[in-house]
Image (cartoon, grey):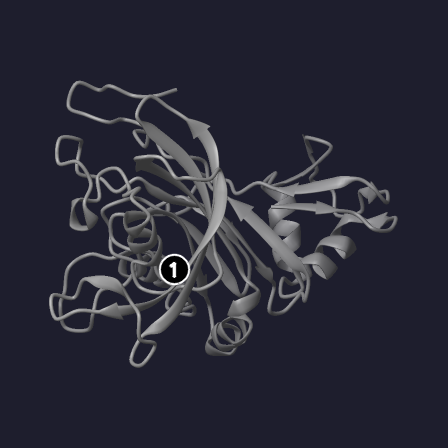
Amino acid sequence: MKITVQKDGPIVDLLVEAFGSASKTHIRKMLKYRMVQVRGQPVTRADYAVNAGDVIEYVKKTGRKNEIAPPVPIIFEDDDLLIADKPAGLLTFGERGTGGTSLYRVLKDFVNQRSGGRQRLRVVHRLDREVSGIVLFAKNGKVQQQIKKNWKGTKKRYYALVEGRPEKDHGTIQSWLREGVDRKMASSDKPAGAKLAVTHYRVVKRLNGHILLEIETETGRKNQVRVHLAEMGCPLVGDRRYGSDAKVIRRIRLHAFYLGFTHPVAGRFVEFESPMPQGFMVLGNKNEKYK
């Protein structure tokens, strides 16, 4: 997370104002453990003077003495939010009574153990099991409801490696999505009982037989990106449920790399990114890949 300073002042005061929900004690711990950088250099003093135009960067550190290591990478955390980098193959949230492992379950246990039972997590949104990338959690019900209330203003972007070639280098796909008896989603001509889904795409790179797209969604319907790309004739690599080539490794090549939203407490727009995961561009058992 990066913050561009708007006025001169001691760094502790500017960070308290920027984070909104973080106490000075929490900010001082961040400084102590070298989690804050200015112009690329760690800052540890609370009275360090920053100037308008300076860039402050929050860098999450792990592995300190007596610290419990998180089960998955944590991109950002403050007193109200936790943003994690979900690996492919892990459910975001398992249905009640089904058991098994999920991102929510492992992070809930981690937060509970680390805080001695004083903190809880609440799910804000989900990614499909085989989709990797940024997932946002709230630490209390009030924050969860505030984020959901303003969710339409959230910016979500994905990397998508697809088969086929779209007719245009950029465009918008819009349709009414309905779930069938087989629990598979599909577009419908009739809006009754269906939900409107809007997906924007642009070509990032043309490869040998495949295309890397950047996707931005206006809505968050079940399997939305997977359905829209498949119906455009460009199914996601590895997404056999929606018509991809069965010869490639069965891993859906969809990664949620960007999330931007208004912080529910600080009231300012914040942005987070996740790098493309290892193996995302691997196509087959012979480790063929595009660079």
Residue type, label 1: Val
Q: Is residue 261 above or below residue 250?
A: below
- In the drawing, does residue 35 fall left or right of residue 161? right
Place of residue 237 in the rendered image (x, y in percent of width and height, measured from the top left): 26, 37
Q: Quadrant of the C terminus?
A: top left
Residue 122 in view in this figure: no
**What is the crowding at mark 1: few (fewer than 14 residues within 10 Å), some, or many (at least 20)?**
some
In the picture, measured across the screen, residue 26 lies left or right of residue 138, that is: right
The residue nearer to you, when weighing 15 against 54, is 54
Q: Answer yes or no: is residue 284 visible.
A: yes
Q: Is residue 123 left or right of residue 227?
A: right
Q: Is residue 215 above or below residue 268?
A: above
Q: Secondary structure at mark 1?
A: helix
Q: Where is residue 280 drawn, in percent x and y?
A: 32, 32
In the picture, residue 288 is in which quadrant? top left
Which residue is located at x 83 percent, y 51 percent? 6
Query: What percent of the width, then of the height, locates residue 29?
Result: 61, 50
The one of 117 and 205 positioned closer to us in this rendering: 205
x and y percent of residue 52 in the render? 86, 45
Q: Report the residue at 30% width, 25% height from top.
A: 209
In the rendered view, would you say 48 is above or below 180?
Answer: above
Q: Relative to the observer, which residue lies in front, 60 or 145?
A: 145
- The residue at which mark 1 appears reads as 111
Residue ranking furthest to the bottom: 192
Q: Total marks drawn?
A: 1
